Amino acid sequence: NSDLILYVNLELVNKKSDRRYIVEEMLGQGTFGQVAKCWDAETNSYVAVKVIKNQPAFYQQAIMEVSLLSMLNDKFDPDDQHHIVRMLDFFPWKNHLCITFEMLGHNLYELLKKNNLRGLQLQFVRTFSRQILDALIVMKGAGIIHCDLKPENILITPKVNSAAGVKVIDFGSACMEGKTIYSYIQSRYYRSPEVLLGYPYTTAIDMWSFGCIVAELYIGLPLFPGASEYDVLSRMIEIVGGQPPDDLLREAKNTRKFFKHVGSIYPGNEAHDGLCSSYRVLTEDEVEARDSKKPKIGKWYFPRGRLDRLIFAYPWKNLNEGNLPETEKEDCLALVDFLRGLVEFDPNKRWSP
Ligand code: ADP
Ligand code: MG
């Protein structure tokens, strides 16, 4: 039992000197605790120390983070080639579990902000996407679902030979495929349709989030910045087109929060195949009447429209098909095609890494 081994190790680590890490500055704050940049007096190098909140639920989940990440690091990526953060150590401190990681740079949300939320050049979108995919391949191979893929959890790596790079961090929500416990997972903008709808999920939910991230890196703003779950889902339907497949809607727990049952499909009748669905999404009025409160206006104004129009005619890229250079036009078409494979409603049809 890996949990047991970790508890035993914790006791051993506890006896070590408590003056090893010197806090230099705070790097970030999340749901699970705080992350500090520290000087490691034993190795004479900087490390990032995540100090977990001292509550049992957070402690348990942090034990999961330690177990899954050490498995990924040691067994599936021993040579540190697959763009997953390295965990260095963990120890208890005043009732807090602390985890030390290699020191990395800014997260991708900070990078986008520095760029005035205008998106990155396509060459960076391509490089970062390929590296995140590399990490996702390893995670799928290990049967691990990250469950919280988003720009804040992807960090720039310090420049080695000036090549840009990223690493996936924060396995604090991760779980094993087939042993999923929680149904309320993923950050709202990056939440997959099957999680929204309350349907059993797999590593495919990370591919949905990945699609959202790729689009955001290019356009600079979140693809589905919904103020509520309903708002997220209606943006998905509007931008991607179509809706989740009937069999998913029939079996999902939360379908009635978002959809109205309007009939039944006609098995074997081609005329209805793909044209007629048993469900239609609720109108805003219907949701308002039910919730008796209007969904809040999103933090960002975001023009709605089809996915290809978003990519091609994005206002601050000031591009449109007419004045795009031929090569960029082809690249944009390829990007739209790529995104379509990722933000696919049906988890079985969605592209795997
Ligand atoms: P949480 O689970 O609370 O979200 P994270 O592990 O995502 O915690 O860390 C929170 C933030 O701290 C990250 O978004 C990032 O900005 C910063 N951070 C985390 N790990 C590192 C690291 N290894 N190097 C540099 N910054 C980090
Ligand atoms: Mg995080």
Image (tube, rainbow, N blue to C red):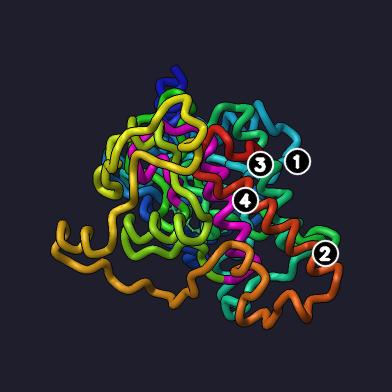
Which residue lies at the image location 40% right of the left edge and 30% below the top edge?
Answer: 266
Residue 350 spot, x, y in % from top left: 58, 39
Q: Nearer the viewer, mark 1 or mark 4?
A: 4
Which one is in front, 350 or 99?
350
Inter-mark Cα distance, 3 to 4:
21 Å
Query: Which residue is disc 4 drawn over?
Result: 340
Residue at disc 2, secondary structure? loop
Q: Quadrant of the C terminus?
A: top right
Which residue lies at the image location 65% right of the left edge and 51% below the top edge?
Answer: 167
Which one is in front, 336 or 139?
336
Q: Is mark 2 within 8 Å of ligand 1?
A: no
Instruction: Tell me if residue 300 comes above or below residue 191 in the rendering.
Output: below
Inter-mark Cα distance, 1 to 3:
9 Å
Q: Nearer the viewer, mark 3 or mark 2?
A: 3
Query: Which residue is disc 1 drawn over?
Result: 81
Q: Counting other residues with Cα less than 10 Å from the Cα at mark 2, is it few (<14), some (14-19), or many (20 or more)?
A: few
Query: Which residue is disc 3 drawn over?
Result: 135
Residue 310 spot, x, y in % from top left: 59, 69
Which amino acid is tagged 3?
A: Ala
- Answer with mark 3 or mark 4, whichever residue precedes in sequence: 3
Determine contact: label 2, label 1, CB under 8 Å: no
Which residue lies at the image location 47% right of the left edge and 43% below the top edge?
Answer: 275
Q: Quadrant of the N terminus?
A: top left
Q: Which residues are magenta?
A: 191-220
Query: Which residue is disc 2 drawn over?
Result: 162
Q: How many marks?
A: 4
- Answer with mark 2 or mark 1, whichever residue precedes in sequence: 1
Which one is in front, 51 or 20?
51
Which residue lies at the image location 58% right of the left edge and 41% below the top edge?
Answer: 87
- Answer with mark 3 or mark 2, whichever residue precedes in sequence: 3
